[in-house]
Image: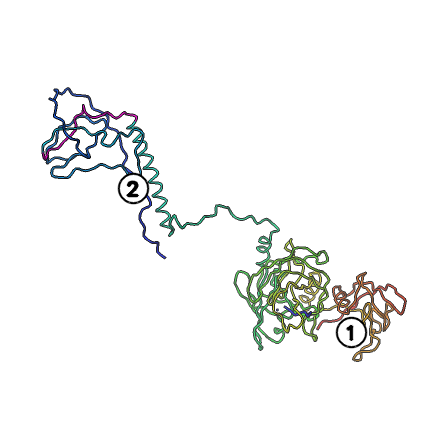
Amino acid sequence: MTHEPTGEAPTPQTDLFAPPEPLVRPVRPAAAVPVPAAPPAPAASPVPGALAVPGASPAPVPSPAGPVASGSAVPGAAPTTATTSAGAGAGPDDGPAGAGVAPADHAPGATVRPRRADRPRVPGRTVVGLATLSLVLGLVGGFAGDRVSETLRHGRTSDNALPVSTAGPASRPAGSVAALAAAVLPSVVSIEVAGATGVSTGSGFVVREDGYLLTNNHVVAPAAQGAAVTVTFSDGHEVEARLVGRTADYDLAVLKVEETGLTPLVLGDSDQVAVGDAVIAVGAPLGLESTVTTGIVSATHRPVQAGEAAQAAFIDAVQTDAAINPGNSGGPLVDARGEVVGINSAIAQPPGAQQATGSIGLGFAIPSNQARHTTEQLIATGTATYPVIGVLLDGSYRGEGVQVSTTEQQGRAAVTPGGPADAAGIRPGDVILAIDGRPVSRSDELIVAIRAKAPGDAVTLRVRTGDTERDLRVVLDEQASE
């Protein structure tokens, strides 16, 4: 496995409800006036369609030219049939068909009205009940009509409207991914570098409020040859940036923008990170700004050699399954407290892959403790140093531990005279088995473990000379980074 750096109008329709029936109000009977008894009239067939008026007083027969009351026969017209309102059936007080129609003598063309004495009297409670029913129907019809009107105004009809959420705003407590993203994103930037060979992109983040940004060296390396660097913040505004310093050995670089009042992210303690811790990766993968992915820490102290052999960065990496893709490089890996525990730098690729193609669930970040020390150096001097013990290692050795070279390499001594290893008693051909109690079996494991320290730190090496093993305390020296 190799490791590669990551840089319509609504359709008209009929009413759904018929108009409400008019409100019926009962008529209070007037005082009775004595009327001489009328002679009996010969029997006549009922007049179809004539309805009794509940509680009405007798009235004189109107002339043909006068107004025609509801239910009266119009001269020369066919009899009419009264109907009930749509949807209303016979109620418990309804009589048989034709009930309430009185017989009357009539001549052709005469207006016929029933005599009061022959008409049944409707109880007052029935009148009140009918009035109440009409009132209720009117209210229901009005409400339904209002809802239909509102629905049509919104371009929907009642038969195609979908359920509407009644839930309130989602709860996003402190520590949730949404809350963390909202806090971190304003401090994360996307970076574009336009050089002679093309344009490359990556990510970065604010480390100081006065405009200092941290990213990967492989993202902005062309800036050392004059390439223009443009930084885009999460609110969309762009600003030119200048390169302050960089180091290929740690794959870190610092940029400066002429802005103040920025919100820096806190560099946390990467030594406290544990496998299984939740993390989020923030950046601009494939140029997609302000992207957040989630995962866990899947391993710690993973030795990773990223980049080309000539400028390989040795990383004592934090491994994560959070998706990291090309363009995420230089962005922060953040823990559940919103603190940066790593700088996303590399992704693993299957054997045979010629270039980074995307995340396969194995991403690597430079530990924040290492980034802190190097960033402070780059801001202060524009350069950085890294710790050494003063030995050359034999890459061809196959066995337990890591062997110190037995011969010179390109004119350099296997053990630097007067260097830290020489002073501690390490000799050419010795085998280093562990560093600070952590076994090592490959050269890059020892190198990244040393580079995770700072010059002047002391480490304990378990060394075997021949058949003898011993622990040696070595104080690390420093060497300027290229």
How far is disc 2 from disc 1 in space, using C-alphas?
95 Å
Disc 2 residue crowd, few under 14, some 14–19, many 20+, Cα 10 Å: some
Q: Is residue 143 magenta?
A: no
Q: Which mark is residue 19?
A: 2
Q: Quadrant of the N terminus?
A: bottom right
Q: Which of the pair 89/53 is nearer the observer?
A: 89
Tell whether 405 sits left or right of 262. right
Kindly state the secondary structure of the residue where label 1 is placed. Answer: loop
Give the dominant element type of the magenta stretch: helix, strand or loop. Answer: loop
Three-letter amino acid code at disc 2?
Pro
Tell whether 348 sits left or right of 37. right
Tell whether 475 sits left or right of 302. right
Three-letter amino acid code at disc 1?
Gly
Give residue 363's quadrant in the image: bottom right
- Residue segment shown in magenta: 108-125
Residue that carries the numbered disc 1 in the rendered image:
395
Query: Residue 269's x, y, as percent?
Result: 70, 57
Kindly state the secondary structure of the residue where label 2 is placed. Answer: loop
Query: Residue 364's x, y, as percent?
Result: 67, 64
Q: Nearer the viewer, mark 2 or mark 1?
A: 2
